[in-house]
Amino acid sequence: MSLTRRALLGSTAAAAALPPRRSRAQAANTIRIGVLNDQSGPYRDTGGTTSVICTRQAVEEFGSHGFTVDVITADHQNKPDLGASIARQWIDTDGVDMIIDVPTSSVALAVNTVCREKNRTYINVGAATADLTGKACAPNNVHWTYDTYMLARSTGGTMVKAGGDSWYFITADYVFGQQLQRDTSTLVTKAGGKVMGASPYPFPGTTDFSSYLLQAQASGAKVLGLCNAGADTVNSIKQAHEFSVNKKMKLAAMLMFITDVNALGLETAQGLNLTESFYWDFNDRSRAFTKRVVPKTPKNWPNMIHAGCYSGTLHFLKAVAALGAAKAKEGGSTVVAQMKAMPTDDDAYGKLTIRADGRLMAPAYLFEVKSPAESKGPWDYYKLVETTSAEDAAVPAGETGCSLVHA
Amino acid sequence: MWGFSRAQAAALLVMVVLVVVSPAVLYPVFLMKVLCFALFACAFNLLIGYVGLLSFGHAAFFGMGSYISAWTAKNWGLSPELAILLGGLVGMALGVIVGWLAIKRQGLYFAMITLALSQMIYFICVEAPFTGGEDGIQQVPRGRLFGFISLNPDMAMYWVTAIVFLAGFLFIHRIVHSPFGQVLKAIRENEPRAVSLGYRTNDYKLIAFVLSTFVAGIAGGTKAIVFGIATLTDVHWSMSGEVVLITLLGGLGTIFGPVVGALVVSAMENYLAQFGAWVTVTQGVIFVACVLAFRRGIVGEIGAKLRLAL
């Protein structure tokens, strides 16, 4: 039976070559943070490695408080099942204590389930769904930067006040787009505006928006709301520019970041309205933060997600320090309770609080993109149009549907 | 026995031992993923390796299986074994329709028809309310096997997955090494000749297609129960592409090839995830290297070296 032996040897060698199950014994005083996001797909610039750099920046600035912190990272490729299985593995075998970022709502909700089941801290920064602090809220999660409600409220509600009282939507025809359109329509109507119509387009796979743009133009609406994300938004804006739709209507990108503006260029993006909760050139503290981070990521300056990763990590570490590493290791709900109990204070977001349902109470800013003539330096892209207070930018406390609030 | 040659029996023994021993060394949830993909690839290999039919839409059956299992387990509270079986049956029913249409054409046209129909199924899944669209069906309970064995501990789930995989694997092996399987191989080698011998080749092809989609549905259903989630990833065409990669890398038309391929591809996805963008780049490079340098795949090349059919 020489063959069996050979096959056996071969397979043993193959098995040995596989990376062994990582059984790093977790020292009680090591806190491990996992940054889980898209590093190769459409959201690699809005999150991606700059999120990792900002998380590391927070760890570095926090310094030593009697425990060590290490950061690991992975690409979830925007697949909910992959995201959930990475999160599960991180918690089961790598001893990860906190997971941060996680853009793409579907992945965010899947990871939320895993973190709740295993009771680990979950700070979502990158995803839009308001369900994270609503139906899916949990004692161990915090939603940091923005959500669909904030975008609809700030961009939709505020623009109506500024005279943009008739809207037309171009909507990616799937859950995210439909939800955004519905939320924005409600707030536009509430603010006294009206919706003239909408063109849902098949998602994914649409690259030609011309017919939708012409319909929008023919509707006579003053504002064109783009309920889509990533490459679709960029494409529709470029084509709106080619058809000069932007000369007749105000363009409002419902979900867009400064990193997308940079990709589009000011020539095309000028005059666009969008909402973020962080802008690097906002005050001395935000400029100081940006100055520290930019040398590490010179081509991709921080947007609100990146700043959120920094701010969220810093606040998490402060909570761990307040509890002591050993107590913090007991579970995510303990740490998050501590995070909710103390106010945040950092250079990116300033002094804020976290509500009982896990929402960070941050004000939202409606920006208009500058024209090339107005822009004075690199990444000098935004001028502030209007600020929405934190209370108005979040879903009213009683209406979230979060079970923690009534408990 | 069961049509195993001595070499195959030895390899089977090694595989079973590895399945039993490896959870002590490797992370069980990762192994369950490997087993689900291995089963899916075995089903795909039945078609391409033994009948010579390249189905480029197998994700539809895998994904539908996973949606149906997830949905029935979550909303009807079906026990996992019934949910998985139902997933397989729905995959099979879909296979009857798609297969009946697709086998009317051959070669590239066959592949294109399967791709087109699976894209239709994908868009149905994007829009249909029961799939949850982008979010998929989440928080699917693992439930209790036969109503009384809780599958929540990872090891309990692992043994169930292992048994499903081995059963599926033996089922496919049995098909391939039956008189029916001989006819399939005859069709692969020379279809007009098989027709001239009096075989109604379309019937054979359809039956093989349906059997394959049944096993693909079972694999999808098992994956949904293991991970508690069924999403668009499973029905997307890139999943059809991934199963082609797995099978090609492991070895087309070898009974163990898909299993080895699934192990390699899943290990890459899992252990390279920390390197971000490099996962997809590495997969691409390996695919190119495989097509250029070792076309028979890992198991195929080993088999050729040892002059054995594995």
Image (cartoon, rainbow, N blue to C red):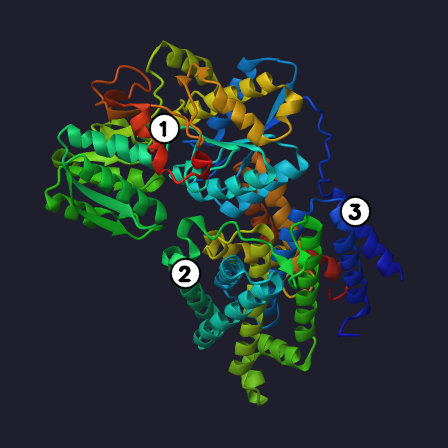
Q: Residue A278's quadrant in the figure?
A: top left
Residue A382 percent coordinates (x, y):
27, 21
CB under 8 Å between discs 2 and 1: no
Tell me if residue A107 comes above or below residue A332 in the rendering. Answer: below
Q: Residue A391's quadrant in the figure?
A: top left
Residue B269 percent coordinates (x, y):
59, 44
Q: CA distance from mark 2 to mark 1?
A: 33 Å
Q: Residue at x 72, y 40 (%)?
A: A21
Q: Nearer the viewer, mark 3 or mark 1?
A: 1
Q: Residue at x 60, y 56 (%)?
A: B143
Q: Is residue B294 visible?
A: no
What residue sits right under mark 1 in the picture? A259
Please name the amino acid that badge 2 sits on. Gln
Name the element at disc 1: helix
Image mark for residue A8: none
What residue sits right under mark 2 in the picture? B119
Residues beneath discs 3 and 2 located on the same chain = no
Left or right of A184, for residue A136: right
Name the element at disc 3: helix
Q: Nearer the viewer, mark 3 or mark 2?
A: 2
- Name the residue nearer the viewer: A256 or A91: A91
Image mark for residue A13: 3
